[in-house]
Image (cartoon, rainbow, N blue to C red):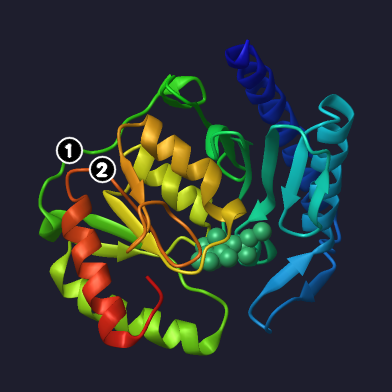
Amino acid sequence: MQENEVATRLDAARAYARAGQELILSRISGPARSLGVDTKTSITDMVTDVDRAVEKLLAGSIREDFEHDKIVGEEFGDGGGDGPYAWVVDPIDGTTNFIYGFPAYAISIAVRDLRRDTTVCGVVLDVPRDRLYEAAEGKGAYVDGRRISVTSRSRLAESLIGTGFGYAAEVRRAQGAMVSEILPLIRDIRRAGAASLDLCMVACGELDGYYESGLWPWDFMAGAIIVEEAGGTVTGGLEPTPGAAMTIATNGIIHEQLRELVLSLAAKYGARS
Ligand code: IPD
Ligand code: CA
């Protein structure tokens, strides 16, 4: 029964993401690329009319199809019903990339079972690359229907690691100091600009690991189940589960090496972990 409830929601999440993608593509394909850019918490933290329109579209469909489910969205906050499932939605993860046309932004949709406080399925649609990543609890992770898995690299020194930076200047200063110490100890660093895609890159072996502090649930929840179902590990820093303080996702093998390093540097530079 619950399995059916999850499968129905995963099918719906896929369809909603595709509808969101169509809306985004229709807004950037016209002659005048007018996105309606605003700022939020700082001049670096941007939002567009398209982010809001996509979230409205997704929330409207969820409300129509699953009237009792709760909805948590980046742009409009909480809504929906008080049933046992919650949809956690980022209409555009990687808004800065979207505004510049830098090809790394995604629609991220996770479904949580609130009775168990766990994510039961997730979809991340890489809009410019047209790749749909998905996972459901216990069912594996897929991109465009093909099964994916994490890398088997075992040495941090040979690992390609992704990260990201927050929008507040003082947070970035500490994050930059940490990266400057991590960089000489690893193969190289990547900052693609969309946390959900960073996680999917770990899931499909395009990165060995990823860490970032200051993420919101809509940034990491769908990507986290995709990493886990691809055989990887996702934790916080000091906490066992990822959260606002820290998200660390790896192939599992290098997890403790990366976690220890990140924790020691976060302590040194007074960053959250
Ligand atoms: C941001 C992106 C970015 C990460 C930031 C997020 P947004 O999400 O995921 O890669 O570094 O922490 O806030 O604002 O583009 O939805
Ligand atoms: Ca966003």
- The answer to the question of whether label 2 and label 1 lie on touching residues, with beta carbons closer than 8 A, is yes
Q: Is residue 231 left or right of residue 154?
A: right
Disc 1: which residue: 152
Which residue occupies the foreground of this view, 174 or 124? Answer: 174
Look at the numbered disc 1 and give the secondary structure of its residue.
Answer: loop
Count the marks. Answer: 2
Residue 214 is situated, as x and y percent measured from the top left of the image, at 50, 69
Residue 54 is situated, as x and y percent measured from the top left of the image, at 80, 48
Q: Residue at x 82, y 31 (%)?
A: 68
> Crowdedness of circle 1 by 10 Å Cα count: few (<14), some, many (20+)?
few
Is ligand 1 less than 8 Å from the beta carbon at label 1? no
- Badge number at residue 251: 2
Q: Residue at x 42, y 88 (%)?
A: 173
- Give the Cα separation between the discs numbered 2 and 1: 7 Å
Residue 4 position by quadrant: top right
Residue 95 is situated, as x and y percent measured from the top left of the image, at 66, 62
Residue 18 visible in the snapshot:
yes
Task: Tell me: residue 161, above or below residue 146.
Answer: below
Task: Tell me: residue 29, above or below residue 228.
Answer: below
Q: Residue at x 31, y 43 (%)?
A: 233
- Extreme residue toward the front, this view: 115
Which residue occupies the foreground of this view, 171 or 86? Answer: 86
> In what quadrant does ligand 2 lie?
bottom right
Q: Is residue 43 left or right of residue 125?
A: right
Look at the numbered disc 2 and give the secondary structure of its residue.
Answer: loop
Amino acid under disc 2: Asn
Amino acid under disc 1: Ser
Residue 123 is situated, as x and y percent measured from the top left of the image, at 58, 35
